[in-house]
């Protein structure tokens, strides 16, 4: 958001050593994370409801592939420009506006289900718009965190953000499983509208000094608005592509930034794509198989899909808690954070293999929890490295590049793994994806051995 640290430091004498973000950072971070918590809760409930509706109606790898393409590719495309926007424009607005647009199209989808004219085409269109909004919002949120949190608190804040995401992923599938069995889908969709409005209200309360646009452009090293007589639109397009070029060059020159972004993309291609097929794995391998844990009995398809999501989310919650407590105290340097991320990626790959060789549903859910722990132990350090190692004026472009590469990595992986899941045993898909994740971990570990002059 526009609450940029450079706008604050410009008013402070050069001799001042205090980080201006120390002043009121707890309130700012609390408002941001609370707003995101509400927004994510509604979005996740609706996302699960939509995906489960597609899975239970179609039960096809191709339908999952199309849902992934419409729900993921737009974010990858828009993120190419979203990172540049996060470096140039008001980040707070870039966090809020996508929520409002997504809420509007969700109302449209709700009305279509209520009136009986909803179909897959309309669902894919809504997934497209929701994904495009994420392409703007995700780099903005990640870029804004280092604007409101001191550098020494980034790993803790990122881990707490991960805990909030994990808690939402625990509550959301449980809520979706209950709601989908007692109320029509159109009413579930309205949950996202309500939480989006609440989330936007919290973020709107954040007051961070705005850096003048002219100063920001000069400091970013971007080309001026229109010095050659070109129209504002043409000049804006030129600036955007200049930002993309500069952001890519900046990121690839920095070993750690290059390492986490390429490693993240490789992980998404090889392991996250199979993980998106766990819904098919559950419906195919455990259809008709119940699991009674005493305090809960998983019998219906929606129960098992919820258990699958809950297991991974509980693992994410545990991993996030470990990173925000032990990790924040032990992983002080980017090198240590990179090594932790590499080890976590290795565990992610091995757990993917474990999902398909689990002898029963109980063991499957235990491995699912381990996979969530590993994912959280990777995500927190990776985000922190990108925030702490990138210059403040380039943070948005770094996150935009990461979002683009990881977003496109998922459909690339799905283009391979989803069709295979319809022609070969789905377990083989998980074994291949899990083992092929390990080279990405090795790459990140190798990068961590490079010394960086600070």
Image (tube, rainbow, N blue to C red):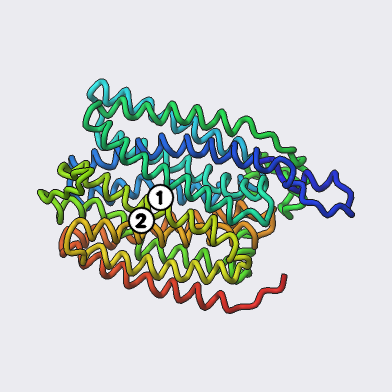
Give neighbour class at mark 1: few <14, some 14-19, many 20+ (Cα, 10 Å): many
Going by the image, does 14 lie left or right of 71? Answer: right
Q: What residue is at 41 percent from the left and 42 percent from the top?
A: 168
Are the residues at dot 2 and dot 1 in contact (C-beta closer than 8 Å)?
A: yes
Which of the numbered marks, if any, corresponds to residue 73? 1
Q: Is residue 369 above or below residue 448?
A: above
Given residues 246 and 289, the one toward you in this image is 289
Q: Residue 25: x percent and y percent?
A: 68, 43
Going by the image, does 339 lie left or right of 301? Answer: right
Q: What residue is at 74 percent from the left and 38 percent from the top?
A: 209
Q: Is residue 412 visible?
A: no
Quadrant (top left/top right/bottom left/bottom right) for the N terminus: top right
Q: Is residue 161 visible?
A: yes
Give neighbour class at mark 2: few <14, some 14-19, many 20+ (Cα, 10 Å): many
Q: Who comes first in sequence, dot 2 or dot 1?
A: 1
Quadrant (top left/top right/bottom left/bottom right) for the C terminus: bottom right
Determine whether the residue tagged by mark 1 lies in a helix, strand or loop.
helix
Q: What residue is at 29 percent from the left and 26 percent from the top?
A: 186
Q: Is residue 356 above or below residue 136?
A: below
Q: Residue 398: x percent and y percent?
A: 59, 57
Going by the image, does 161 lie left or right of 439? Answer: right
Q: What residue is at 19 percent from the left and 56 percent from the top?
A: 361
Q: Residue 400: x percent and y percent?
A: 55, 53
User: Outermost residue, front direction?
Assistant: 294
Q: Residue 3: x percent and y percent?
A: 70, 41
- What is the spatial separation of the Cα atoms under label 2 and label 1, in whole angstroms? 7 Å
Which of the numbered marks, if any, corresponds to residue 411? 2
């Amino acid at each position: 958001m526009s609450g940029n640290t450079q706008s604050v430091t410009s008013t402070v004498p050069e001799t001042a050593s205090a980080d201006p973000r120390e002043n009121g950072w707890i309130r700012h971070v609390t408002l941001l994370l609370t707003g995101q918590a509400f927004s994510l809760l509604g979005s996740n409930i609706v996302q699960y409801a939509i995906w489960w509706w597609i899975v239970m109606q179609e039960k096809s790898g191709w339908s999952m592939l199309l849902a992934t393409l419409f729900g993921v590719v737009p974010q990858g495309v828009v993120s190419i420009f979203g990172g540049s926007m996060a470096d140039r424009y008001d980040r707070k607005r870039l966090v809020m506006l996508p929520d409002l647009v997504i809420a509007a199209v969700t109302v449209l989808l709700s009305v279509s289900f209520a009136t009986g004219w909803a179909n897959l085409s309309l669902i894919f269109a809504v997934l497209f718009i929701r994904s495009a909004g994420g392409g703007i919002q995700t780099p903005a949120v990640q870029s804004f965190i280092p604007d409101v949190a001191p550098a020494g608190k980034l790993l803790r804040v990122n881990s707490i953000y991960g805990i909030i995401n994990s808690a939402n992923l625990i509550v959301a599938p449980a809520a979706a499983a209950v709601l989908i069995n007692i109320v029509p889908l159109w009413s579930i969709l309205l949950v996202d509208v309500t939480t989006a409005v609440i989330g936007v209200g919290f973020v709107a309360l954040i007051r961070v000094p705005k850096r003048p646009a002219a100063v920001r452009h000069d400091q970013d090293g971007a080309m001026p608005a229109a010095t050659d007589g070109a129209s504002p639109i043409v000049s804006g397009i030129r600036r955007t592509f200049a930002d993309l070029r500069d952001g890519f060059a900046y990121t690839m020159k920095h070993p750690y930034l290059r390492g986490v972004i390429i490693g993240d993309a490789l992980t998404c291609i090889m392991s996250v794509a199979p993980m998106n097929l766990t819904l098919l794995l559950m419906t195919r391998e455990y259809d008709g198989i119940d699991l009674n844990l005493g305090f809960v009995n998983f019998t219906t398809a929606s129960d098992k899909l919820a258990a699958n999501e809950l297991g991974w989310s509980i693992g994410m919650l545990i991993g996030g808690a470990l990173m925000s407590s032990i990790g924040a105290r032990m992983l002080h340097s980017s090198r240590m954070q990179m090594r932790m991320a590499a080890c976590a990626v290795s565990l992610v790959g091995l757990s993917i293999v474990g999902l398909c060789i689990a002898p029963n549903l109980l063991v499957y859910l235990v491995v699912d929890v381990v996979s969530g722990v590993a994912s959280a132990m990777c995500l927190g350090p990776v985000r922190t490295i990108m925030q702490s190692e990138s210059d403040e004026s380039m943070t948005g472009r770094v996150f935009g590049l990461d979002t683009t590469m990881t977003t496109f990595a998922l459909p690339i992986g799905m283009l391979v793994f989803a069709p295979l899941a319809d022609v070969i045993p789905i377990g083989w898909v998980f074994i291949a994806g899990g083992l092929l994740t390990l080279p990405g971990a090795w790459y990140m570990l190798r990068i961590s051995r490079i010394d960086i002059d600070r």
